[in-house]
């Protein structure tokens, strides 16, 4: 983004990068009609996963991210499933899925433990007691080995969708 | 989504805080039965997933892969669980 001032920098983190192991987790996975506990490793055993951490449902970066991912439809042409994670509740996820007219499933992680495990916690200034993941994208294979990783370094910050596209194309 | 091989044989379709669903959960716990929960929409008209499985949009509904039974209505489910799994206790 070209703005006439400095954007907030986020602190350095030690998130898992290419070749490293992505932490497994189990959380309610929400579709447009139900949710159930599912682990990342279960999903990945079926098909590589593009795991997309996004701000809470309703925040504008989430709207932008999901519009872009919906329109790019990586899952149509590549052996990948796109799955989200945010701190929003299953009810909010159902609304987001409807509003964005998308078919992606979203993990619900209100206590932000998954972001902690990935070292991408974003403590929100001005919202006492609330933290969420910083925007981040991890492409993992069936062994949960990271094939591509990106995490926001500024707030706000958006994925490099072309780089993501190259990564899913090289699976 | 494909079922993992270690999935419990019983799937319970439930609505958060629905007392009829909790009644079934209590019975499943009483017989120490392993089950997998699927939560659905509060709006009755939006529960097509349950309708596809059981023929009705009501919850609770259970699918028991062990016996091939799919069933709605908590009283029926409790009676079924008593009959099927209560004998040994």
Image: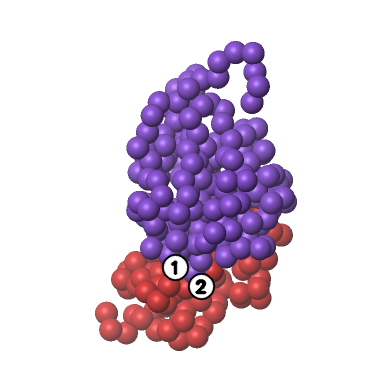
Q: Are marks 1 and 2 in contact (CB under 8 Å)?
A: no
Mark 1 crowdedness (10 Å alpha carbons): few <14, some 14-19, many ≥20: some
Look at mark 1 in the image and give the residue it sits on.
A45
* Chain identifier for the purple-coloured part of the image: A
- Residue A166: x %, y % from top left: 58, 52
Of all chains in the rendering, the one displayed in red is B
Q: Which of marks 1 and 2 is in front?
A: 1
- The quadrant of the rendering that contains the N terminus of chain A is top right
Q: In this view, does A156 lie above or below B77?
A: above
Give percent across and percent down for residue A122.
45, 30
Residue A145 placement: quadrant: bottom left
Q: Where is residue A100 in the image (x, y as percent from the top left)?
A: 70, 46
Chain under disc 2: B
Whether discs 1 and 2 lie on one chain: the answer is no
Looking at the image, can residue B60 be seen?
no
Q: Which mark is residue B53?
A: none
Q: Which of A6 and B39 is in front in this view?
A: A6
At 57% across and 48% down in the image, what residue appears? A164
Which of A33 and B62 lies nearest the eye of the viewer? A33
Name the residue beneath numbered marker 2.
B2
Residue A150 on image: x %, y %: 49, 41
């Amino acid at each position: 983004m070209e703005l006439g001032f400095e954007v907030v920098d986020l602190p350095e983190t030690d998130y898992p990068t290419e070749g490293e192991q992505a932490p497994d987790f189990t959380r309610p996975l929400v579709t447009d009609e139900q949710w159930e506990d599912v682990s990342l490793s279960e999903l990945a055993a079926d098909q590589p996963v593009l795991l997309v951490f996004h701000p809470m449902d309703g925040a504008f970066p989430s709207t932008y991210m999901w519009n872009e991912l919906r329109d790019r439809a990586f899952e149509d042409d590549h052996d990948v499933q796109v799955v989200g994670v945010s701190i929003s509740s299953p009810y909010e996820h159902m609304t987001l899925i409807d509003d964005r007219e998308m078919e992606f499933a979203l993990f619900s992680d209100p206590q932000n433990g998954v972001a902690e495990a990935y070292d991408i916690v974003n403590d929100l200034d001005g919202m006492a007691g609330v933290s969420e993941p910083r925007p981040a994208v991890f492409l993992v294979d069936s062994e949960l080995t990271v094939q591509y990783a990106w995490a926001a370094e500024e707030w706000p910050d958006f994925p490099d969708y072309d780089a993501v596209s190259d990564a899913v194309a090289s699976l | 989504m494909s079922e993992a091989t270690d999935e419990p044989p019983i799937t319970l379709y439930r609505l958060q805080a629905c007392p009829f669903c909790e009644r079934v959960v209590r019975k499943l716990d009483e017989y120490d039965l392993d089950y997998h929960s699927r939560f659905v929409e509060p709006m009755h008209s939006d529960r097509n997933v349950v309708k596809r499985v059981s023929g009705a949009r009501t919850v609770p509904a259970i699918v028991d892969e062990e016996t091939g039974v799919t069933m709605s209505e908590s009283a029926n489910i409790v009676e079924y669980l008593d009959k099927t799994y209560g004998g040994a206790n």
